């Protein structure tokens, strides 16, 4: 159960990159905007891309799909790589931070983390299950402190921790040839089928379009990518 409510992190690459650098992510990796999901727009995104993060509104259509998806997986099963890093979200409004951590944690073979809060957290969390990782995350004071500091830096009016928030961040990563959706609110990671290190952006974009198609009247979707900086 959530023990604290945070002010949500804004989907703003400048804010997100400051946050990641506070955690020890080197500045040759960073969050960039994905301006559109069509091939031409995707071609503008710097490569390589190692993770794609979607911010979307939580709607009745989303909740219904989420329940059906969970029931289908529980009945049919799915394969999940043992190398995948996944954790539960046990603190309210931390989905942006959890999404960013998921993106970095599954790419530490390419992102050489500096000594800092995230490297320490990942070392301690390595052998834990998803629930225990979520509990450890809540106790990671340096990461939570960095979230609180950067949540105040967004360009929009900063909400209070008590304000109702109906937007949610999730991240897509490539691991062992499979595209995974990592959502700390879901019961488990979601296997979305085959992908590669070179096609993760395009394959994740297809799943993002499915989220949008379930809410055709909704326009409040934002996509960003974790990519090598130029």
Image (spheres, helix red, strand yellow):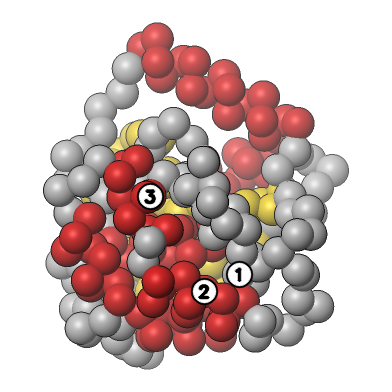
Query: Foreground residue, 149 or 34?
Result: 149
Q: Which residue is label 3 attached to? A: 134
* Farthest residue, direction right: 217
Residue 14: horizontal and vertical position, in percent? 56, 85
Q: Is residue 65 left or right of residue 142?
A: right
Quarter of image, res 178: top left
Residue 201: horizontal and vertical position, in percent? 42, 58
- Count of marks overlaid on the render: 3
Q: Is residue 63 visible?
A: yes
Q: Residue at x 49, y 15 (%)?
A: 71
Q: Is residue 170 left or right of residue 112?
A: right
Q: Are marks 3 and 2 in contact (CB under 8 Å)?
A: no
Dot 2 falls on a residue whose secondary structure is helix
Q: Which residue is label 1 attached to? A: 9
Distance of mark 3 from mark 2, alpha carbons? 15 Å
Q: Is residue 154 left or right of residue 27?
A: right
Q: Residues within 10 Å of mark 3 (few under 14, many from 20)?
A: many
Q: Are marks 2 and 1 in contact (CB under 8 Å)?
A: yes
Q: Which residue is label 2 attached to? A: 147
* Farthest residue, direction top: 75
Q: Pick whichever of labels 2 and 1 is earlier in the sequence.
A: 1
Q: Is residue 11 visible?
A: no
Q: Pick whichever of labels 3 and 2 is earlier in the sequence.
A: 3
Q: Residue at x 65, y 67 (%)?
A: 7
Q: Residue at x 38, y 49 (%)?
A: 134
């Amino acid at each position: 159960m959530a023990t604290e409510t945070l002010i949500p992190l804004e989907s703003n690459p400048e804010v997100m990159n400051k946050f990641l650098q506070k955690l020890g992510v080197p500045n040759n990796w960073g969050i960039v905007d994905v301006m559109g999901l069509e091939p031409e727009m995707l071609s503008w995104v710097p490569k390589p891309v190692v993770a794609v993060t979607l911010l979307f509104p939580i709607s009745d259509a989303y909740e219904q799909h989420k329940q059906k998806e969970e029931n289908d997986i529980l009945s049919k099963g799915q394969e999940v790589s043992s190398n995948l890093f996944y954790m539960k979200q046990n603190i309210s409004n931390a989905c942006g931070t959890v999404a960013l951590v998921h993106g970095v944690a599954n790419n530490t073979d390419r992102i050489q983390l500096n000594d800092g809060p995230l490297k320490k957290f990942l070392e301690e969390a390595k052998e834990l299950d998803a629930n225990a990782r979520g509990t450890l995350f809540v106790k990671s004071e340096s990461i939570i402190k960095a979230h609180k500091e950067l949540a105040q830096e967004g360009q929009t009016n900063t909400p209070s921790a008590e304000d109702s928030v109906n937007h949610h961040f999730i991240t897509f990563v490539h691991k062992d040839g499979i595209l995974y959706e990592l959502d700390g609110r879901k019961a488990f990671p979601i296997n979305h089928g085959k992908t590669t290190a070179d096609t993760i952006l395009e394959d994740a974009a297809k799943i993002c379009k499915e989220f949008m198609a379930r809410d055709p009247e909704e326009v409040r979707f934002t996509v960003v990518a974790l990519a090598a900086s130029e």
